[in-house]
Each structure stands twice: as structure tokens, then as C-alpha cells.
């Protein structure tokens, strides 16, 4: 154990510091980047990220959409959450309507 004298704001303090052995810290695991959504033969299903109620439907079947475009607005815990298009495509089918309650991972529409 070593003793050090430390001055703080004009006042001297004696501090004892104990020597410890070095340990290696584990390397943090880096999560893999999520892959871009992939469409199946049926198309890409856009899923609800959480439970809530659909308060706006901003697309209809046949609409062309761009990645990042707002498709729906989902209200959850009094907050409005925009549901965005994950990729460019065409709305093949809208599976929800205004005021419909949805659970997490429920499909909202199919993109092709």
C-alpha cells in the first residue's frame, strides 16, 4: 500500500492507495448490423413494432413508396409512432384500417 499527499483547495489530504493486480477486461461484443429486409415470394411484410392502435393509414394498394416514407401512424401509450417503408416498392395489400388495434409483430401491409 502506498500513501500519497493530495492538496485540494489549499487543504492537504493523506490518501492510501492499494496496489491491485491487472485483469483483462473482456472485449465488448459488437452486435451485427441488421440486414436489409428481404422480400419473399409473397412480398415483404411491414410489421407493427409494438402494440397499439392504427390512427392513420397513409397508403393504399398499388401506391409506389420510397424507403423511409411514412406508411402508417401507430398510437401507443399516447405517443404517435410513424411506421416507415423499409425499402422502395409497391403496396401490394394494406392489412389494417384506422382505429384497428394491433399487437407487436402484426403485419400492417405487404410491399413488393
Image (cartoon, rainbow, N blue to C red):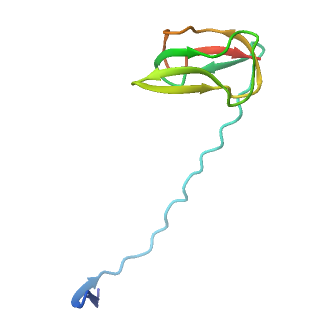
Relative to 31, say whether 86 is above or below. Answer: above
Nearer the observer, 19 or 101: 101
Nearer the observer, 53 or 3: 53
Give the quadrant of the C terminus. Answer: top right
Relative to 16, say whether 110 is above or below. Answer: above
Question: Which residue: 22% across, 88% down?
Answer: 14
Numbered label tally: 0
Query: Looking at the picture, how far across and down is residue 34, in whole percent?
Result: 65, 38
Question: Which residue: 51% across, 15% down?
Answer: 55
Question: Which residue: 69% across, 9% down?
Answer: 93
Question: Which residue: 68% across, 28% down?
Answer: 86
> In which quadrant of the rendered view does residue 44 lie?
top right
Query: Looking at the picture, how far across and down is residue 36, in whole percent?
Result: 71, 33
Query: Looking at the picture, how far across and down is residue 23, in whole percent?
Result: 45, 69
Give the quadrant of the N terminus. Answer: bottom left
Tell me: 13 left or right of 43.
left
Query: Looking at the picture, how far across and down is residue 64, in whole percent?
Result: 77, 19
Nearer the observer, 30 or 81: 81
Tell me: 59 left or right of 27.
right
Amino acid at each position: 500500500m502506498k500513501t500519497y499527499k493530495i492538496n485540494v483547495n489549499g487543504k492537504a489530504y493523506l490518501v492510501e492507495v492499494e496496489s491491485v493486480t491487472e485483469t483483462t477486461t473482456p472485449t465488448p461484443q459488437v452486435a451485427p448490423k441488421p440486414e436489409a429486409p428481404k422480400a419473399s415470394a409473397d412480398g415483404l411484410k411491414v410489421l407493427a413494432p409494438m402494440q397499439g392502435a392504427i390512427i392513420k393509414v397513409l397508403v393504399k394498394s398499388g401506391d409506389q413508396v420510397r424507403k423511409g416514407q411514412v406508411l402508417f401512424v401507430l398510437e401507443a401509450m399516447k405517443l404517435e409512432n410513424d411506421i416507415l417503408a423499409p425499402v422502395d416498392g409497391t403496396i401490394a395489400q394494406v392489412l389494417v384500417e384506422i382505429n384497428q388495434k394491433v399487437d407487436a409483430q402484426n403485419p400492417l401491409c405487404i410491399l413488393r
